[in-house]
C-alpha cells in the first residue's frame, strides 16, 4: 500500500465540526418553531424563520470555506472527493431544515401535528451526534458507533414519518391543510435521510483511511 501523507493542519476537521454545529443550531430553531405552534399561533414564526435563514447562511459560509480550503491545499487529510461529498451532505441537512421552517411560515400553519416533535427530536439527536463525531475524523477512531446509531435513528424517523402520513390522510384535516402539512413532514424526513447520507460518507471515509 502506498504511503499516504496526512497533514497535521486541523483546519478541515475544525471546519467540519463547525458545519455540524450549525446543524445543532438548526435543530434547536426547529424546536423553537414547534413551541411557537403549540401556543396561540405563529406570532413569532417570522422571527424564527429569519433566525433559521441566518443559520443557513452561516452554514453556507462554512461549506464555502471547506471548498476554498480543499481547492487551495496540496495535501488533504483524505480524498478530495470525500471532502466535497461530506461538505455537501452536511449542507443538505441544513437546507432541508431551513426549507421546513420557511414552509411553516409561508403557509401560515398555526398548528402542527404533535408527532412532528418526534421528528425534531430525531434530528436534534442526529445533529448532536454528528457534532460530537466530526473531531474524531482526525484519528479515524471510534466512528462505527456513529453510523450505526444514525442508521437506527433514521429507521425511527421512517416509522414516525409513516405514522404522520397515516394521520394526515385519516380525515382529521382538510385537504389543503393535508397538502401543506405533508410538505413540512416530508422536508423533515428529507433532513433525517440527509443525516444518514452524512453517516454513510463518514463510513466510506473510515473504510478508506482506517
Image: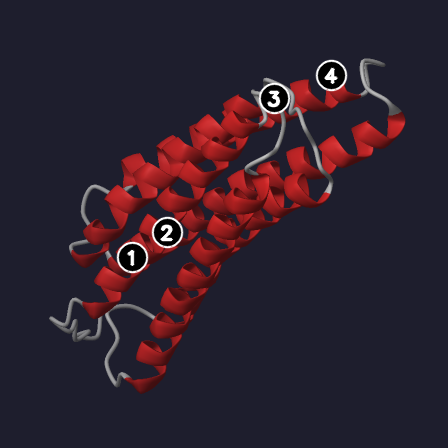
155 and 62: which one is in front? 62
Is residue 90 in sight in this rendering?
no
Where is mark 1, residue-wise? 18
Q: Mark 1: few, some, or many residues within 10 Å (few <14, many ≥20)?
A: some
Spatial CA distance of label 3 from label 4 is: 22 Å
The relative height of residue 130 versus residue 154 in the rendered view (above or below) is below
Name the residue tied to disc 2.
Answer: 22
Q: Is residue 181 above or below residue 117?
A: below
Residue 184 at what x, y percent from top left? 67, 37
Q: Which residue is mark 4?
A: 167
Q: Quadrant of the N terminus?
A: bottom left
Image height of 81 relative to 125, above or below: below
The single residue placed furthest to the right in the displayed view is: 175
Disc 1 vs disc 3: which is toward the camera? 3
Instruction: Determine whether label 4 and label 1 are within 8 Å by CB.
Output: no
Q: Is residue 119 found left or right of 5 in the rendered image?
A: right
Q: CA distance from mark 4 to mark 1?
A: 37 Å
Counting residues from the N terminus, which is met first, the one under dot 2 or under dot 4? 2
Badge 3: how crowded within 10 Å, few (<14), some, or many (20+)?
A: few
Left or right of 74 in this view: 23: right
Real-space Cα separation, disc 1 to disc 3, in angstroms? 35 Å
Helix, strand or loop for disc 2: helix
User: Label 3 belongs to which residue?
Assistant: 40
Amino acid at each position: 500500500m502506498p504511503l499516504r501523507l496526512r497533514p497535521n493542519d486541523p483546519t478541515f476537521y475544525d471546519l467540519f465540526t463547525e458545519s455540524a454545529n450549525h446543524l445543532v443550531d438548526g435543530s434547536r430553531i426547529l424546536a423553537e418553531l414547534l413551541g411557537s405552534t403549540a401556543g396561540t399561533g405563529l406570532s413569532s414564526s417570522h422571527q424564527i424563520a429569519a433566525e433559521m435563514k441566518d443559520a443557513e447562511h452561516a452554514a453556507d459560509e462554512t461549506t464555502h470555506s471547506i471548498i476554498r480550503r480543499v481547492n487551495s491545499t496540496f495535501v488533504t487529510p483524505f480524498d478530495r472527493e470525500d471532502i466535497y461529498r461530506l461538505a455537501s451532505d452536511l449542507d443538505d441537512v441544513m437546507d432541508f431544515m431551513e426549507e421546513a421552517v420557511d414552509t411553516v411560515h409561508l403557509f401560515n400553519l398555526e398548528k402542527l401535528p404533535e408527532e412532528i416533535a418526534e421528528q425534531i427530536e430525531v434530528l436534534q439527536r442526529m445533529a448532536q451526534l454528528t457534532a460530537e463525531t466530526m473531531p474524531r475524523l482526525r484519528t479515524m477512531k471510534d466512528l462505527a458507533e456513529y453510523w450505526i446509531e444514525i442508521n437506527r435513528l433514521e429507521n425511527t424517523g421512517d416509522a414516525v414519518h409513516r405514522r404522520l402520513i397515516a394521520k394526515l390522510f385519516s380525515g382529521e384535516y382538510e385537504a389543503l391543510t393535508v397538502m401543506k402539512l405533508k410538505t413540512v413532514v416530508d422536508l423533515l424526513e428529507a433532513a433525517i435521510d440527509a443525516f444518514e447520507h452524512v453517516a454513510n460518507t463518514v463510513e466510506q471515509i473510515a473504510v478508506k483511511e482506517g
